[in-house]
Image: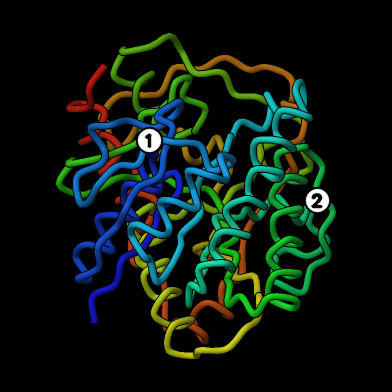
Amino acid sequence: MSRTVLVAGGAGFIGSHVCKALAEAGDRPVVIDTLEKGHAWAVKWGPLERTDIGDATTIAEIFRRHRPRAVVHLAGYIEVGESVRKPELYFHNNATKSQTLIDAACDAGVEAFVFSSSCSVYGVPRTPLLDETHPFAPISPYAESKARVEGMLERAARERGLAALSMRYFNAAGGDETAEIGEAHVPETHLLPLAVDAALGLTAPLTLMGTDYDTPDGSCVRDFIHVSDLAAAHVSAIAHLATRGSAGHAGLNLGSGSGYSVRQALVETGRVVGKPVPFSEAPRRPGDPPRLVGDSARARALLGWRPTRDLAKQIEDTLRWRLKMPR
């Protein structure tokens, strides 16, 4: 059955892919986005409501007018380094404003609320593979802001009957395989698009931040997950919550279960592009754990979801998009 889904942050990288996946599943995505970070050209599968999720009056009116059955919340700032410099900005924009959206969803009686969380809520891992039983210990204001929203959802589920899932992403990468949409952050902070651009000579050499971590080659180890696989998980999450029809909140890891160091990812990018990635070395970036690799067994069991696109595919799709994207 077709449903209307409000997608907060739907003009962004992950949000636009979620909207496409929803439309392909027969649903109607309605995007809420300020376009401060997102792009109007990425809104292709439903209407755009250009507003801030912290504007309670406007958000309530949008709920009344569109009568959504589900909400996907991806709005927020994402730069870890900036969050260290401006923590209150991240707490206000990512957490405080989210309460307004959650309250509106509860008032409207939506049947599913899916939140874009992050594996960074776990902090420095105590185990090689992170599962959802790992305690929260965020080490950046960005991560703390995500943890705060999960706490809000937990309370809304307990006190107001909300059915919610928090999707704890690992490193989102890649892009739509037709290059219809893709990653276009300003500034760009994610590794694969930066590496592809450097290899193509479109930008200056990449800066590898941190070479003295306790990892095999000294660089951070990360779990890269294709954005289209993430989008598919959101569609499955809405269907699961709507079918279950009961209140509650849970967190789900969305990762591949395989870790690659930054140096390994640069080598693989050079192989796919056909040119080596030029880079320089720099000190660690504040707020970065040495290793983040996820165990997504719970998402497989609950949603029947598993990632299907490996690191090489992620780089191939990134390359296709970077050659086409608006600049």
| Residue picked out by circle 1 | 50
Going by the numbered disc 2, the residue's amino acid type is Val
Going by the numbered disc 1, the residue's amino acid type is Arg
Task: Give the numbered dot on residue 5.
Answer: none
Q: Secondary structure at mark 2?
A: loop
User: Which of labels 1 and 2 is toward the front?
Assistant: 1
Say few, some or many: other residues with alpha carbon within 10 Å of mark 1 (under 14 / 14 to 19 / 20 or more): some
Q: Circles 1 and 2: CB distance less than 8 Å?
A: no
Task: Measure the alpha-carbon separation of dots 1 and 2.
Answer: 37 Å
Residue 326 visible within the image: yes
- Judging depth in this view, the residue of 261 and 288 nearest the camera is 288
Between disc 1 and disc 2, whose residue precedes? Answer: 1
Above or below: residue 108 compared with residue 38:
below
- Is residue 29 left or right of 145 when viewed as pictured? left
Q: Residue at x 38, y 11 (%)?
A: 203
Above or below: residue 306 compared with residue 273:
below
- Judging depth in this view, the residue of 193 and 266 nearest the camera is 193
Colour pattern of the rendering:
rainbow
Location of residue 156 in the rendering, given as x and y in whole percent from the top left corner: 70, 69
Location of residue 58 in the rendering, given as x and y in whole percent from the top left corner: 48, 43
Above or below: residue 292 compared with residue 248:
above
Residue 129 visible within the image: no
- Is residue 177 left or right of 123 when viewed as pictured? left
Q: Using the rendered view, name the quadrant where residue 199 is placed.
A: top left
Quarter in which the N terminus is drawn? bottom left
Q: Residue at x 74, y 20 (%)?
A: 283
Say few, some or many: other residues with alpha carbon within 10 Å of mark 2 (under 14 / 14 to 19 / 20 or more): some
Task: Give the numbered dot on residue 124.
Answer: 2
Q: Residue at x 70, y 33 (%)?
A: 90
Q: Residue at x 55, y 53 (%)?
A: 223
Above or below: residue 247 compared with residue 212:
below
Location of residue 296 in the rendering, given as x and y in whole percent from the top left corner: 56, 72
